[in-house]
Amino acid sequence: MLPHLLFAFLTAAAPAWDFYATRRLKKNPGSVEKIGYYKSLCGWLWTASIVAVATVGIREVFTIAPMPDDAFWLFGHAWVRYLAETVLTLFTALMLQPYATVAWKKLKNRPRTYRAAHAFKSLEYFFPATPTERRWWAFVCVTAGCCEETLFRGFMLHYLHVLPWTMNLTLALLISSLIFGLNHLYGGVSGVVGSAIGGFLLGLLFLLGGNLFLPIILHALIDLRMLVILPTRAEQAPPLRNSSA
């Protein structure tokens, strides 16, 4: 019974909570409200992950050993597997590029411009600005890496592909990726689509690697990159003018 309830929660209740919670946050984007949202998000993600592991099993959640017939398009053709690995490599490089940019500028002693931050201007109510918010955001990112991979890759693929539905693995991956996208309604249609595609690629990494270790690490790093993309509130403030000038 618990796996069914957890699946229903992830499919309907969690996206609904995210939609209304982020709407309230957008109307009142204070620091207290933002941190309260972060705490609530981490709370239900960790609770749901514990339920998933307790009901399905830690090995079943964190490892996968698909048979060639489970996703023949991926495992039945060597060139498709190489293509998938190339796409994953490019995806990883693109997502982690901000870290390389920051490291290069520090090495060259060049100032930060934060030009990429303009792309996230519409979501500034959601992303951290103060030091306390940024510390909580780091915890949110680690939580998302661990828990969302546990829930939307480990648990959901087992639930859809093995028991009780015994779906085709490819269909299970597509459905789980779509549900993952719906849990990111705060980003609008583009956020849902982007998250669904990202979820599919992380699912491919899970299938090819056989365990959740790499997807968890990559997922956390993708979310943590906002801390290097977005300036702190102190960096956003204009410099003080010299009173003698």
Image (cartoon, helix red, strand yellow):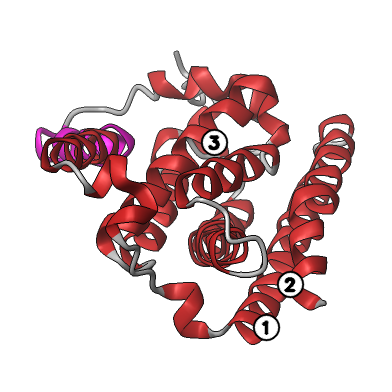
Across and down, in percent, residue 36 comes to: 80, 57
| Residue plotted at (68% across, 65% down) | 45
Residue type, mark 1 in image? Thr
Under mark 3, the amino acid is Ser
Q: Using the numbered discs, state the Cα–Cα distance from disc 1 to disc 3 in whole angstroms.
A: 26 Å
Badge 1, how many Cα within 10 Å: few under 14, some, many 20+?
some
**Which residue sits furthest front?**
69
Q: Which residue corresponds to mark 2?
A: 3
- Mark count: 3
Q: Residue at x 66, y 39 (%)?
A: 184
Q: Which mark is residue 55?
A: 1
Q: Quadrant of the C terminus?
A: top left
Q: Position of residue 59 (x, y in %)?
A: 45, 83
Where is residue 77, by image quadrant? top left
Q: Amino acid at mark 2?
A: Pro
* Neighbours of disc 2 within 10 Å: few (<14), some (14-19), many (20+): some
Indicate the position of residue 196 as horizontal and vertical percent values.
54, 36
Q: Which region shows up in magenta?
A: 94-109
Image location of residue 21, percent across then percent down: 85, 44
Front position in the image: 206 or 77: 77
Of the numbered discs 1 and 2, the one sitting upstream in the chain is 2
**46 sits to left or right of 19:** left
Classify mark 1: helix, strand or loop. helix
- Note whether residue 218 is visible: no
| Left or right: residue 83 compared with residue 21 | left
Badge 1 vs badge 2, beta-carbon distance below 8 Å: yes
Corner quadrant of residue 10 = bottom right
Q: Tell me the distance, in whole angstroms, between the alpha carbons under discs 1 and 2.
A: 7 Å
If the image is split into quadrants, where does the N terminus sit? bottom right
